Image (cartoon, grey):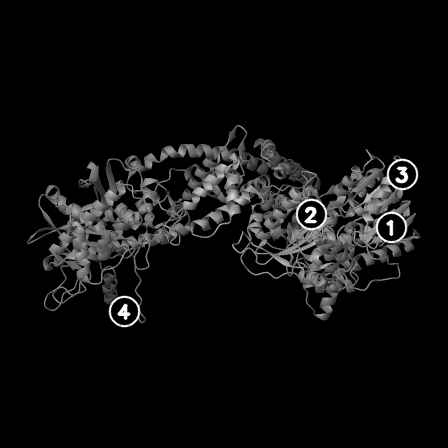
């Protein structure tokens, strides 16, 4: 029994010495006593590969490459420990979830209605750390008690005491759950330490330890047992010299971590009575790793001092073949990653390197993992990402999570569709397509399908959003429901079976069986197998390697759950939470898809002593060295306080910060041929980043070494050769070529080499198609060409049927009109009350109320009657609004009451208006056009085509005057409106005047006599509040409220006509009903909204001309992206189709259509008169 230390600086040949010793023993005696190489878990594959590729060594049984855990498992199989089943991290996470839920009321800090995200992981990490450092649950409980007593005596903060109280409870419960059945991975080392003495496998064994810089107390216990059992134990340490038991390194020593390890190993050997062999110290003048690169050899040898490079200055030039160190400052992380990819391609193509000769290190993997996967995929570089990856993004994980959330969480629609969109829900004989899922989701969002409504037949009815009084529209919607119900049933079949099985389950075991049955019923395993084949066929080995192991991991998770607590009583909520916690901790270790690939890892974890070229990315301030921050459950101060009382955990932030120098040394001295160090100058948001302090130190070691800049794309200031470096791969070359060509079209110079790139891509069939397509995009100007006549006729027919609002939409933006009426695009409907729903309710209720009470004559003019009838009309119509939305919840019922109040109050005012007016309704919700009461307004267009204007008028009133029949239009609005003649002149407000034109034009046939226009009025349907500081008398308040309903619009400037609308109106008074007031001389004031008969004719002609011009532009195929802008108003503000048109005033071809206001009233009427030219008289 002996211990031998092998020490040497980085690259001195320590690992090679060990491998050679093992190889020599294998060759001399292939069947001798065991030869065991102990390495970190993540290094086992590399070391096994190094062994099996030994020339002249075709195979061996005697030697094994193991990690501590794999050795423990090997010894446990022999000594009886294999009867206890190892528990994985996801199993511990599930158990922790159960313990936290059970202890919720007893815990002081870690309690709550729902387990905090990440809390289980942090508790698990801390308990693992305690086990590694020999702290059991009994010891923690004693510490918790002592700390609580100290807090009570000294009145210090109870935070640490509360943490220890909760953790000791959790730790004790976890140990009780595991004892006798399960073995924590950390406890395996205890088994190994206790069982090594009785192992025959270790008899006469010779053991080497390589790749370690330090050991935990548990590992030291294992080493002590191995020292007592094995013939010889050799420990390889990256250390400049051995440290003996009585020595301790200075805390600032570069090799402090390994020096401490050396001293503790010697101390352990002495205490165990083990013979110490003379150490092997490898200290060559030039380490073998750096034999061919003087710069890297100098860097390694002088890392701990400030000596400057004394070699040839020519070596510092990046283009010199002996330059082993290259520094880069990249514009951003993307530019940095792409520069590395280009350099890798160059070295493989030009220098004969292999991908496996390269390693890439990043300190903050989260910043680079996805980016590197994308960039390396773009450049076709094979790679292996060292480490275990979370699989929480995988469809199978989401499938199980969301399915359990459906059953345990009350069938939330969001959970149902998350489950459906994994493409795993359904059955093998009825897979639901994404299109079907999208249609069902659209329905569910619009109909408010959520919770119990998934199972209620009453909740599933045809969606309806149209005329609330149109029975035929409701019947037409029923056909669409049949297909949706089929999709719903196909989706819910397996979920309902899962729910039924889980609700009938009596134990956790039966819950697991129900979940497994659900996976079987849906054919999840077959789908994963299919995805695996598809990924293999499409060249995605990384994705292919995930599906099968993940299925195994899922089944293992259920197996662990059954073994852990299979006989416990079923609790669906607890079960769902435990599975979710287990899935959160489910990670898969990747196997290199190829032996020839770039190794990507982090300096702390990845071990690679055989690479020639190292790329170190992200060398920024705060990253290298890492700015240490505590993200565990114990703060640094709390760790120090525990250490004082004898509860020592892993080194704290201060020690880890000091050890950053050693980590940097190992990282910078890994490469044997070439070291690339780079840092981004900005993050993904454009915020500036500073370089690491090690960049400055490297430059001080090598005065004059340049930092080369890396741009995101080729720059004009670069030489042609430098620009063409960006064309390292056809895909990226194409991207940069387009940028060059775009600049060339704008008059910029383009290097001749880029035309060579163009020719190369054009001459290759597989790239020529993409080249042609992308080059065509250079002419992009976001201009929509007019539709062809054939397309226009197919869309609109020979006789265009349109509403006035459609004409107004066209003027607002021709493309918006095309999107709605040509492409028939619709915004996704949601289960909420929108303005159109409220408007339809108002219109229908007021129509029914007005029609009934005017039919009663004078008896129907009582304000109270109007309120009663309006309330009844609203109650009748509420079930038809947006699929009964106003009856669906207490919140919506409150909204319904408010809407009822608005309608009843507005109806009462309408009743008072009726009592003051000689105008009576002759048409309510009156349609004109096909199947309407009145014919359409027909206008002839060019080319023999016609346009019919159709619509529905809220209300038409008539009165008899001394000059004949008068007609006026009333429109109910849920918001305040005025008729703006500037908007009329531009065609933005045509509806009311068109309606008046229609009824006046058809009056002789409709009413039996000619009529004159009396005006158009907007009635604001509202329930206003009166604001007054001190209150007011009841009568004054009633009058003030009445004035709030004063209608707006435009009236005929005829005193008799106006007084027929408000019979209370006298000379020198202001009407509270219509927008007029008289001056003392009886004339209309300037504030009156009136027009004389000739002006009404101008308006009529202007509106008809506008409609005809608009119709002509529609049938001519005008779909231009030209939204108007008037003042600061534009239809783009609330447009649903911006993702379709991509309007941008900064893009060529896009510009607003500027509409100006007239400078004076005279100019405004002149514009209207000019617009009326060419109008028809009929």
Label 4 neighbourhood size at 10 Å, few (<14), some (14-19), many (20+)? few
Tell me, for residue 1032, which label it has, or none. 4
Q: Are marks 1 and 2 in contact (CB under 8 Å)?
A: no
The residue that disc 2 covers is 359
Dot placed on the residue nearer the N-terminal end, 4 or 2? 2
Q: Along the polypeptide, which appears first: circle 1 or circle 2?
A: 1
Labels 1 & 4 near each other (Cβ < 8 A): no
Mark 2 or 3, nearer chain start: 3
Instruction: List the single residue furthest toward the left.
Output: 962
Q: Who comes first in sequence, dot 3 or dot 1?
A: 3
What is the x, y in percent for residue 514? Answer: 60, 35
Q: Nearer the viewer, mark 3 or mark 1?
A: 3
Report which quarter residue 283 is drawn in: bottom right
Disc 1 to disc 4, C-alpha distance:
95 Å
Q: Residues within 10 Å of mark 1 (few under 14, many from 20)?
A: many
The residue depicted at 28 percent of the width and 57 percent of the height is: 976
Residue sitting farthest toward the top: 429
Q: Is residue 96 left or right of residue 875?
A: right
Element carrying mark 1: helix
Q: Nearer the viewer, residue 30 or 425?
A: 30
Task: Report whether 1052 appears left or right of 23.
Answer: left
Q: In the rendered image, is residue 980 in sight?
A: no
Q: Nearer the viewer, mark 1 or mark 4?
A: 1
* Secondary structure at numbered mark 2: strand
Mark closer to the chain start, 1 or 4:
1
**Quarter of the picture holding the C terminus:** top left
Give the residue number, with chain letter if any, for mark 3. Answer: 33
């Amino acid at each position: 029994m002996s211990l031998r230390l092998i020490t040497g600086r980085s690259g001195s040949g320590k690992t090679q010495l060990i491998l050679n010793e093992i190889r020599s023993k294998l060759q001399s005696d292939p069947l001798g006593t065991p030869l065991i190489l102990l390495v970190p878990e993540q290094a086992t594959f590399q070391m096994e590969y190094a062994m099996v590729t030994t020339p002249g060594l075709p195979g061996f049984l005697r030697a094994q490459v193991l990690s501590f855990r794999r050795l423990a498992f090997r010894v446990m199989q022999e000594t009886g420990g294999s009867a206890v089943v190892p528990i994985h991290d996801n199993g511990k996470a599930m158990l922790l979830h159960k313990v936290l839920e059970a202890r919720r009321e007893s815990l002081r800090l870690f309690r709550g209605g729902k387990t905090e995200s990440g809390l289980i992981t942090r508790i698990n990490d801390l308990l693992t750390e305690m086990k590694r450092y020999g702290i059991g649950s009994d010891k923690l409980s004693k510490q918790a008690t002592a700390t609580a007593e100290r807090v009570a005596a000294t009145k210090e903060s109870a935070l640490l005491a509360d943490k220890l109280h909760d953790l000791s409870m959790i730790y004790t419960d976890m140990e009780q759950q595991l004892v006798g059945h399960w073995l924590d991975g950390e406890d395996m080392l205890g088994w190994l330490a206790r069982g090594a003495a009785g192992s025959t496998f270790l008899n006469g064994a010779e053991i080497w330890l390589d790749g370690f810089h330090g050991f935990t107390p548990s590992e030291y216990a294992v080493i002590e047992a191995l020292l007592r059992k094995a013939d010889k134990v050799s420990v390889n340490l990256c250390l400049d010299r051995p440290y003996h038991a009585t020595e301790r390194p200075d805390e600032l020593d570069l090799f402090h971590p390994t020096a401490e390890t050396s001293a503790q190993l010697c101390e352990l050997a002495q205490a165990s009575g083990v013979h110490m062999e003379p150490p092997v110290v490898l200290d060559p003048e030039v380490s073998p790793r750096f034999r061919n690169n003087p710069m890297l050899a100098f860097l390694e040898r002088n890392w701990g001092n400030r000596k400057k490079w004394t070699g040839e200055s020519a070596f510092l030039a990046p283009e010199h073949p002996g330059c082993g160190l290259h520094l880069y400052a990249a514009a951003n992380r993307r530019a940095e990653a792409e520069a590395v990819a280009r350099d890798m391609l160059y070295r493989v193509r030009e220098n004969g390197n292999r991908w496996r000769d390269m390693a890439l290190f990043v300190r903050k993997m989260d910043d680079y993992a996805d980016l590197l996967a994308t960039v390396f995929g773009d450049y076709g570089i094979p790679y292996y990402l060292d480490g275990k990856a979370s699989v929480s993004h995988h469809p199978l994980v989401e499938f199980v999570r969301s399915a359990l959330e459906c059953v345990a969480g009350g069938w939330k629609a969001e959970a149902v569709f998350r489950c459906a969109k994994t493409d795993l829900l359904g059955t093998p004989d009825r897979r639901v397509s994404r299109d079907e899922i999208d249609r069902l989701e659209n329905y569910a969002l619009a109909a408010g399908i959520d919770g119990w409504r998934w199972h209620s037949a009453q909740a599933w009815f045809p969606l309806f959003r149209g005329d609330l009084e149109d029975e035929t529209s409701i019947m037409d919607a029923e056909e669409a429901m049949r297909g949706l119900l089929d999709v719903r049933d196909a989706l819910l079949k397996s979920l309902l079976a899962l729910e039924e099985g889980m609700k009938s389950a009596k134990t956790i075991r039966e819950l697991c069986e129900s979940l497994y049955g659900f996976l079987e019923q849906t054919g999840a395993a077959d789908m994963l197998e299919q995805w695996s084949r598809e990924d293999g066929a499409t060249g995605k080995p990384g994705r292919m390697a995930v599906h099968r192991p993940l299925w195994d991991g899922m089944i293992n998770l259920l197996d662990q759950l059954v073994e852990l607590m299979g006989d416990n009583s079923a609790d669906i909520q607890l079960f769902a939470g435990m599975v979710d916690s287990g899935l959160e901790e489910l990670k898969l270790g990747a196997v290199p898809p190829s032996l020839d690939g770039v190794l990507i890892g982090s300096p702390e974890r990845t071990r690679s002593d055989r690479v020639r070229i190292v790329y170190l990315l992200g060398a920024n301030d705060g990253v290298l060295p890492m700015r240490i921050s505590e993200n565990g459950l114990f703060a640094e101060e709390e760790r120090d306080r525990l250490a004082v009382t004898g509860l020592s955990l892993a080194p704290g932030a201060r020690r880890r910060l000091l050890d950053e120098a050693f980590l940097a040394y190992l990282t910078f001295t890994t490469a044997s041929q070439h070291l690339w160090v780079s840092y981004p100058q900005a993050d993904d948001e454009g915020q500036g980043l500073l370089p690491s302090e090690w960049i400055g130190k490297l430059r001080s070691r090598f005065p004059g070494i340049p930092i080369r800049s890396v741009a995101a794309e080729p720059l004009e200031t670069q030489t042609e050769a430098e620009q063409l470096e960006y064309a390292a791969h056809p895909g990226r070359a194409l991207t940069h070529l387009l940028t060059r060509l775009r600049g060339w079209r704008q008059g910029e110079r383009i290097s001749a080499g880029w035309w060579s790139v163009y020719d190369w891509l054009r001459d290759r069939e597989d790239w020529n198609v993409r080249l042609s397509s992308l080059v065509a995009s250079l002419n992009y100007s976001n201009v929509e060409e007019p539709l062809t006549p054939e397309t226009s006729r197919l869309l609109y027919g020979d006789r265009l049927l349109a509403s006035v609002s459609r004409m107004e939409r066209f003027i607002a933006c021709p493309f918006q009109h095309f999107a709605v009426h040509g492409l028939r695009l619709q915004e996704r409907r949601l289960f909420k009350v929108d303005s159109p729903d409220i408007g339809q309710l108002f219109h229908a209720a007021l129509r029914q109320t007005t029609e009934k009470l005017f039919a009663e004559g004078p008896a129907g003019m009582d304000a109270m009657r109007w309120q009663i009838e309006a309330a009844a009309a609203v109650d009748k119509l509420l079930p038809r609004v947006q699929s009964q939305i106003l009856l669906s919840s207490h919140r919506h019922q409150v909204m319904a009451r408010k809407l009822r109040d608005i309608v009843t109050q507005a109806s009462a005012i309408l009743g008072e208006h009726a009592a003051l007016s000689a105008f009576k309704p002759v048409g309510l919700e009156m349609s004109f056009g096909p199947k309407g009461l009145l014919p359409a307004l027909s206008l002839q267009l060019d080319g023999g085509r016609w346009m019919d204007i159709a619509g529905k008028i809220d209300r038409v009133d008539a009165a008899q005057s001394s000059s004949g029949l008068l007609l006026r239009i009333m429109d109910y609005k849920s918001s305040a409106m005025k008729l703006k003649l500037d908007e009329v002149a531009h065609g933005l407000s045509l509806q009311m005047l068109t309606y008046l034109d229609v009824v006046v034009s058809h009056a002789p046939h409709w009413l039996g006599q000619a009529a004159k226009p009396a005006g158009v009025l907007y009635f604001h349907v509202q329930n206003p509040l009166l604001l007054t500081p001190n209150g007011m008398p009841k009568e004054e308040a009633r009058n003030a409220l009445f004035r709030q309903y004063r209608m707006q619009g435009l009236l005929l400037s005829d005193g008799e006509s106006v007084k027929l609308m408000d019979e209370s109106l006298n000379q020198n008074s202001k009407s509270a009903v219509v927008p007029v007031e008289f001056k003392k001389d009886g004339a209309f004031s300037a504030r009156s909204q009136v027009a004389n008969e000739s002006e009404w004719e101008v308006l009529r002609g202007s509106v008809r001309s506008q409609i005809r011009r608009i119709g002509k532009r529609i049938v001519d195929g005008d779909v231009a992206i030209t939204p108007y802008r008037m003042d600061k108003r534009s239809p783009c503000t609330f447009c649903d189709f911006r993702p379709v048109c991509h309007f941008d005033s900064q893009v060529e071809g896009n510009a607003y259509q500027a509409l100006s206001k007239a400078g004076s009233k005279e100019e405004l009427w002149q514009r209207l008169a000019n617009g009326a030219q060419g109008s028809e008289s009929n």
